[in-house]
Image: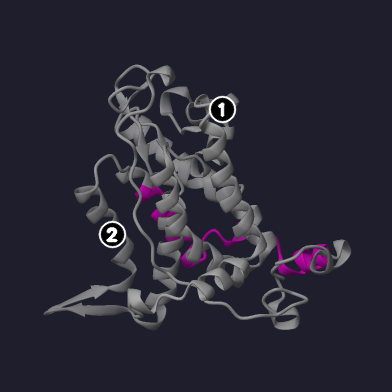
Amino acid sequence: MPSFTQFNPTRLRSYVFRLPLTTRLLLAAIVGLWIAAIPFPWIREAAALAPDKFDLTQMHRLNLFPLTHLGFFHMFFNIIAITPLLERFESEFGTIVTLSLFTGPFGLLPGGLYLILEKFILRGNTAVVGSSVWFFLLLSSEAIKTSKQNPSFNIGPYKIPTWTTPLFLILLTSALIPYVSFLGHLSGAAIGYLWGLGYIKFLVPHEKILRWVETKLNLLGRLPHYVSVDQKTYGRYGVLPTAGAGGAGGIPLVEEAELEEGLGVRGGEVGDGRGRRSGV
């Protein structure tokens, strides 16, 4: 692993400029919502996944809560965590698949699971925001992939299953970092395991359909940094095939302990005071 003294800003700049299209769009949406929430703090309240405020008229929360953050550092560390994993996912599955999943099922499924666990099992009312739900989803998917080649690793005399690595990280962050959402992270990891095991691959349209859409709309020619679903033919970036590095590391995210009183949140309490806003 290169040391800090070997850090090369040119390589970092090159990596950033090679990020694929959907990764760029999602990161831009995260930054854009954070900027918008500075003059309009009610945006965070409207996007938070709050069990007591959720009903069929509030379905937008399932799409917005991973993109919304409580402050600059919450947003910054989330971006650092998810960027290499998101870039790797898009490089493997393509731009269309990544866009459809992260604007749909990868928000709806972990968000819905969290609501069920929090509201109906624990009878709680903790509102959550933050894209670390995606970090644990992607990390769990990568853990399943890695476990097929390396089923376990040794720590002293103990043999640890590789697929359990995200669970240990969830426990560690919950124990060491205040105000993180254990259930939120666990919900993201659960969906990541299902994806990695192939149980929810049916959510993606057939590759022939995706290839037909790409050809019909000439997406490879029109969109820069577009990743084709048929990488064997077109290369990673379609018309301009290049190679890029992607990491699997990440940083667990934390929340701010308080929001402004104008949001009706004080001391980390939400709504009726029974719930605590968490960063996931």
On residue 156, the disc is: none
Q: Does residue 204 appear in this view?
A: no
Frontmost residue, 142 versus 218: 218
Query: If you read the primary sequence from the N terminus, does the residue marked by circle 1 or circle 2 appear first?
Result: 1
Above or below residue 208? Residue 274 is above
Q: Main secondary structure of the magenta part?
A: helix
Where is mark 2, residue-wise?
A: 169
State the CA–CA distance, disc 1 to disc 2: 31 Å
Name the quadrant containing residue 258. Answer: top left
Q: How many C-alpha atoms fall within 10 Å of the one at disc 2: few (<14), some, or many (≥20)?
A: some
Question: Which amino acid lies under the numbered mark 2 shown in the image of this protein?
Answer: Leu
Which residue in the structure is indicated by mark 1? 58
List x then y, in percent, for residue 178.
24, 42
Specify the segment rendered in magenta.
185-214
Examine the structure image and report whether residue 275 is included in the region drawn in magenta.
no
**Quarter where residue 232 is shown:** bottom right
